[in-house]
Image (tube, rainbow, N blue to C red):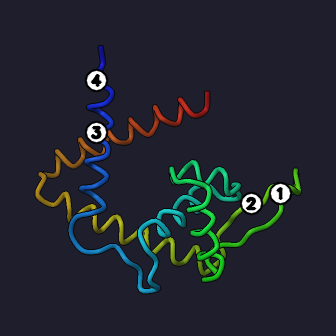
Amino acid sequence: MRNWTGVMKSIMQLQTLLFSSGTPLRTQDGLNFTQEKALLAIYDNPKKSQKEVTFYLNLDKGAVSKIINTLVEKNYVERFPSPNDRRITLLDLTKSGEKETLKIRKKFSKHIEEVLSSLPEDRKQELYDHLNQVVKITEEIIDN
C-alpha cells in the first residue's frame, strides 16, 4: 500500500522550506505572500472566475474575496463579466499587475535558488525534473 500521507507531508515540508526560509518574501508595495500567490495564480490562469482562483489557492471563499478586493484596490487585478454567463465574474491582471507578477516570479526563482544553493547542480536538476513530472501527472489528473 502506498504511503500517500507521507508524500503529502513531504510536499508540505518542501513548500515550507522553499517559501518560509531565508529572506522575507515581501514586495516593495507591501503585498503579503498569499496576495503574491493570488497574482501568480491569476497570471498562470488568466480570465478565470474567482471560484477557480479559490481552488488554485486552496483557501476559503471569504479569504480569497478579501485578497482579490485588495488587489483590485491596488490596481493589480480587474474584474469583468464572463461573455458566456454574465452572472460569473472573471479576473485578469492589469498592466501594473502583470509587471508586479513578473517581479514576484523573478524574486521567487532567486529565493528558491538561494534555498537550494547547498545542493550540487545534478541534485538540483534531479529535483527539478521530478517536480516537473509531478506537475505533468497532476495536469493529467485535472484534465480527466
Q: Residue at x 34, y 41 (%)?
A: 131
Q: Position of residue 132 (x, y in %)?
A: 38, 41
- Provide the residue designation for mark 1: 82
Q: Residue 3 has which mark?
A: 4
Marks 4/2 in contact by CB < 8 Å: the verdict is no
Task: Tell me the quarter of the image containing the C terminus.
Answer: top right
Amino acid, disc 2: Leu
Q: CA distance from mark 1 to mark 2?
A: 6 Å
Q: Of the two numbered discs 3 and 4 on the same chain, state the one appearing first in sequence.
A: 4
Amino acid, disc 4: Asn
Q: Of the two numbered discs 1 and 2 on the same chain, state the one appearing first in sequence.
A: 1
Which residue is more in the foreground, 106 or 79? Answer: 79
Q: Of the two numbered discs 4 and 2 on the same chain, state the one appearing first in sequence.
A: 4
> Which residue is situated farthest in the bottom direction here?
28
Q: Of the two numbered discs 2 and 3 on the same chain, state the one appearing first in sequence.
A: 3
Q: Residue at x 38, y 35 (%)?
A: 133
- Provide the residue designation for mark 2: 90
Marks 2/3 in contact by CB < 8 Å: the verdict is no
**Foreground mark, 1 or 3?**
3
